[in-house]
Amino acid sequence: MTEKNVVSAIHDTLMDEMKRDDRVVVLGEDVGARGGVFRVTMGFVDEFGEERVIDTPLDECLIAGVAIGLAIDDLRPVAEMQFADFIFPGFQQIVQEAARIRYRSNGDFGVPMVIRAPYGGGVHGALYHSQSIEAFFAHVPGLKVVVPSTPYDAKGMLIQAIEDPDPVLYLEHKKTYRLIKGEVPDERYTVEFGKAAVRREGNDLTCISYGLMHHYCVEAAERLAKDGIDAEVIDLRSIYPLDTEAILESVGKTGKAMVVYEDNKFLGVGAEVAAQISEHALFDLDAPVVRIGGAHVPAMPYAPTLEKWFLPDVDRIEQHMRKLAEF
Amino acid sequence: MTEKNVVSAIHDTLMDEMKRDDRVVVLGEDVGARGGVFRVTMGFVDEFGEERVIDTPLDECLIAGVAIGLAIDDLRPVAEMQFADFIFPGFQQIVQEAARIRYRSNGDFGVPMVIRAPYGGGVHGALYHSQSIEAFFAHVPGLKVVVPSTPYDAKGMLIQAIEDPDPVLYLEHKKTYRLIKGEVPDERYTVEFGKAAVRREGNDLTCISYGLMHHYCVEAAERLAKDGIDAEVIDLRSIYPLDTEAILESVGKTGKAMVVYEDNKFLGVGAEVAAQISEHALFDLDAPVVRIGGAHVPAMPYAPTLEKWFLPDVDRIEQHMRKLAEF
Amino acid sequence: MSKDLHTDLGLKEEDLIEMYRFMLLARFCDERQWGLNRQGKAPFVVPVSGHEAAQVGSGWAFEKGKDVFCPYYRDLALMLVAGLTPKDVFLGLFGKKDDPSSGGRQMPAHWGSKERNIITGSSPIATQCLHAAGIAYSKKYKKQDAVVGTWFGEGGTSEGDWHGAMNFAGIHKLPLVFVCENNQYAISVHESKQVAGSVHGRAAGYGMPGALGDGNDVLESYKLVKEAVDRARAGEGPSLIELKTYRFYSHTSDDDDRTYRTKEEVDEARAKDPIPRFEKYLRSVDILDDKQVAEITENAKTQVAEDSKEAEAADFPDPIDAAKHVYADLEVE
Amino acid sequence: MSKDLHTDLGLKEEDLIEMYRFMLLARFCDERQWGLNRQGKAPFVVPVSGHEAAQVGSGWAFEKGKDVFCPYYRDLALMLVAGLTPKDVFLGLFGKKDDPSSGGRQMPAHWGSKERNIITGSSPIATQCLHAAGIAYSKKYKKQDAVVGTWFGEGGTSEGDWHGAMNFAGIHKLPLVFVCENNQYAISVHESKQVAGSVHGRAAGYGMPGALGDGNDVLESYKLVKEAVDRARAGEGPSLIELKTYRFYSHTSDDDDRTYRTKEEVDEARAKDPIPRFEKYLRSVDILDDKQVAEITENAKTQVAEDSKEAEAADFPDPIDAAKHVYADLEVE
Ligand SMILES: Cc1ncc(C[n+]2csc(CCOP(=O)(O)OP(=O)(O)O)c2C)c(N)n1
Ligand SMILES: Cc1ncc(C[n+]2csc(CCOP(=O)(O)OP(=O)(O)O)c2C)c(N)n1
Ligand SMILES: [Mg+2]
Ligand SMILES: [Mg+2]
């Protein structure tokens, strides 16, 4: 066991995986000498050389398309999108190629690749360094989309992603990088995809979230606990596959559900979660499902006054929790 | 009044708009001499010349980006994506640029452009000529996404889209092009965005859909009517803005809701519709919300046996309607 | 016998006869599929006629079993060289269960076969160029003796994928050959509205050799691509070869080329048909005579007829199979 | 007085002094914003130092009020030429309500101003190149006398957007000038891993003139771009001008350039500082003397100091304004 923050857990895990298996290569912008703008591949080029730590040209279409080729030829590429906001030139390669190659070839070819993407707001990144992208990709059959929110999961899910026979979008919330610390086992382990984590048990309401918002939800729940209100807090961890079972089980117990996400509310992940509850747990519900998501504006602006307006914070979550508990 | 099918309504309307306003230009692949692969711009190049009917290179990123430039310079571009499936190289230009330019410039600039995209299945188009794309774009603030399903709406919504000060994704279901006919007024009119159409009134259940599926739902509802079951059938027409009011009003009346869409079910438009019902109409519901959507496979395959498996048809919709009515 | 052109290229008599046979096979497959389309038995057809020399000539420059093919939908003749049979072609045409490319999941002409090193292709144009670059990088990384080829039309050069692949291949001196089958049209869009400058003229800007050749001349097509393959194999990096040719039929069975090109233009191009041209050459160097031509033609025709019949009789996939192979390890509903 | 270099370029004494002043203003804005960053008053800074000659020289070739600017984040000096004031720059730096580019919505250096024909820019690299192509097409369509310029780094040439813009501009002979500020690094990635071949070497492949110039020489930068602007205005189509220069500071305040380049390399580049170099020239042709230099420097410094103070004192946007301008005609929650 060693205490690490999220970014060092990712760094160390990726380094270990590359030492274990020389099929694992990393590619992306500034992953070489710079060690990545968030330092995830710090020291890699010295350890593994430029051939395995590929500084690519400034073209995410290239990064995704080349990674697919590497994976088809049986390497295990871990591609970095410098910011999730910049993944879109690669959208076609990821959605039309990586996601569909196994299916369209009737199982003949596979694409065992990982795409890492730092995402999320609250870092003064404004419109183009704050975005959430999980909804776009979780909608696409053939892709897996995961969002570890703790150093423990960051390690176990990254190893799982690298071992996965299919393309995995591995999302890292930038604000959790240094903010969130935790014990990480030194031995190798994996965290299965499609299993949510109940981080806090409670009987009064179910609060479902992931990424940075999950930590805010736990904090809000602790505040309610002081007044004897017990919220059950679920960290989805994996968006697709989604752990419907865990959600329904908890809602069956509490009868009240809220979903919290920083992505734009409309057609965000919370929509799917609320929809599944309305399909499968309707008669368990004692209150309408509550969705707290980003406003329908194009990601958070730069000015501190505006950014604060956009991002759900612990206070806002707490208020909604109390309202729901009292319903 | 003239009877037209969907594709001729679009063709005639676009031609009229170009005659009215020389700021309107069309661009896309094969829109010139070929008149578009679906013949929407048939005869345009003879009428308006190559400068206004631009055969672009094979690059959807270019099509979207150039259209943005044209719109910024106060033209009214109507860009054609040959198939919705091929819009993705233009994803960044549409989502990061067109959608956000008004917002990021604090209202200084606007992008009055229309993107037309033939979408949808049931046309033996296999994985890459059958896709639905509305969920990706309706999730993005700054865009409007509309899906006319009748010749009347095709005309009124296309004119509305061209007049709209903001970017509009105008989706045309390929199978409705020649299948769906209807009376179209000869005079100019618009159909407001964000207003759903109740195509069939009923008190027993509410069936919400759009595009081709809407017509299947009406057919299924007619079958039920023979047995005295009255389904209310709503054609959303506009995905964003979404007519929440009309949905809630109908569900308030019937107490039962189903959403039918051919796009992949997970995080498709039906998720948002079901979520809003679970937030705002929970206690009106006498039955769980039913979602009928495409399976979690990458669009429909080519072989007739496989395509049939994927696409919801009238029979499947009818069965679910009956189950829901009997609930 | 007059000094021939092929000996210096290292081509033996058997090679030439095989190349000729593949060109005929492709042509007959094409004519057959159009026939089936008219009979309403094949809803969608992608023609190859006119491209046979460019495809067979370029394909012949690669080593089967070792090198890798990243083709596009036009490449029926190339796929025969790469190891697909006419029967495979027709299984795909009908969307049958045993279609090796996709088990009937993709439209016809979306080639793929792992055992033959044919990388599965999609409809979106030019995406294969980046896969080719990634595979070429992997081969170099593994120090494997393998050259990757990727084929595309001149329209494909407009996409960012092509630009990225050219750039990455140039930077890393990858064992990769870019083959452009320039038939001057992207559906209806003429090259003049598609390509500023020229395709082969772009090579220099990416620091690689570029060449323009007559795609109706199978020997010239072979020569230029073989030189590029040899350079790639020798570690000298990528090349871009542009082969000018023409598409005899409409873009696909959904297209009508009379809306954008004249009968005169098409007739003129057909007059340069690569097959009779190659046959003439083979006769001129006494490799073929009437009897052999008749025999090869006859055999090719029969094989195509039989293969298409067998394919037509084959089974469609089971509906329920549509749910398979979305993920290797997840069931989906 | 020795024969000068500027008269033939059509540059008058006032021009040169103005150009010099803008270069100084840009440099002082940069030094000021770094100071504010160290004081914790400006969380994010995008430096311009080193690029002043390339930007002022290229910008000076365009006609304000008529021509259109599609810049990128590095273009602080260019924006001063285009009409933004140092105060505007600092309003953006602090994210204040009156920031003309975005009202504090975007990160600093995301320029835009409709009245100044500066097209709003975003963070995604090279997207502005296609907007420039569309605007240039529109100008041609409307037969307006206007030339469009678009600026980008050598890293920007890797994106498909750049490829598409070059292709479209070449096909339609658009009144568009592509200006590449090649500082040899894209954050940490050296040109050798970014660009196969060369940037200016790509122009020919798109059928347009390309030129390479010394981006530390304001007169050469002006000359090459002016020739391109003149060609564009005369209806002779687009050009690509590559200006070699260097970035003195880290990529942004979030970067640390010591991880990827040596102090020696940076010092060597700083020795070629375009500002003293231009000053030397202006003295050599007796346009400036010590007194004038001191005066211009003094005025520029004071303006920057005052403007930044005023900007710092200005108001932030109201939180609720964040909901405005998503659509022209829809309210959002
Ligand atoms: C990304 C994308 N956009 C559009 C299309 C539609 N489309 C299919 S083939 C084609 C023309 C391709 O022309 P070219 O590359 O020259 O190849 P050719 O068919 O002439 O051999 C187009 C526009 C597509 N398949 N993919
Ligand atoms: C699409 C996209 N990918 C990545 C980035 C992150 N990024 C910002 S600037 C930059 C380097 C740009 O280098 P260059 O184009 O040479 O311009 P310079 O900063 O050197 O002036 C990168 C990779 C981005 N902004 N957009
Ligand atoms: Mg072509
Ligand atoms: Mg640079």
Image: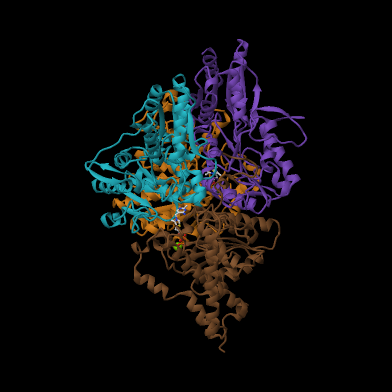
Chain colours: A purple, B cyan, C brown, D orange
The correct choice, above or below, for C275 with respect to A161 in the image is: below
Q: Quadrant of residue A177?
A: top right
Q: Where is residue C167 in the image (x, y as percent from the top left)?
A: 56, 56
Answer whether residue A292 is visible to the viewer in this image: yes
Q: Observer-nearest residue: A310 or C142?
A: C142
Is residue D97 or residue C155 the one in the foreground? C155
Outermost residue on the top side: it is A227
Furthest-front residue in this view: B227
**x and y, in percent, of residue D24 in the image:** 47, 41
Vertical position of residue D139 compared to residue A282: above or below: below
- Is C26 in front, or is C333? C333
Task: Locate residue A182 relative to residue D295 in the image: left or right.
Answer: right
Residue nearest the observer in this picture, C143 or C218: C218
Outermost bottom residue: C1
- Which quarter of the rendering shows the N terminus of chain A? top right
Examine the image and state in which quarter residue C149 appears. bottom right
Image location (x, y in percent) of residue B285: 46, 22
* Residue C128 vertical position relative to residue B260 in the rendered view, above or below: below
Number of marks present in the image shown: 0
Q: Is residue D21 visible?
A: no
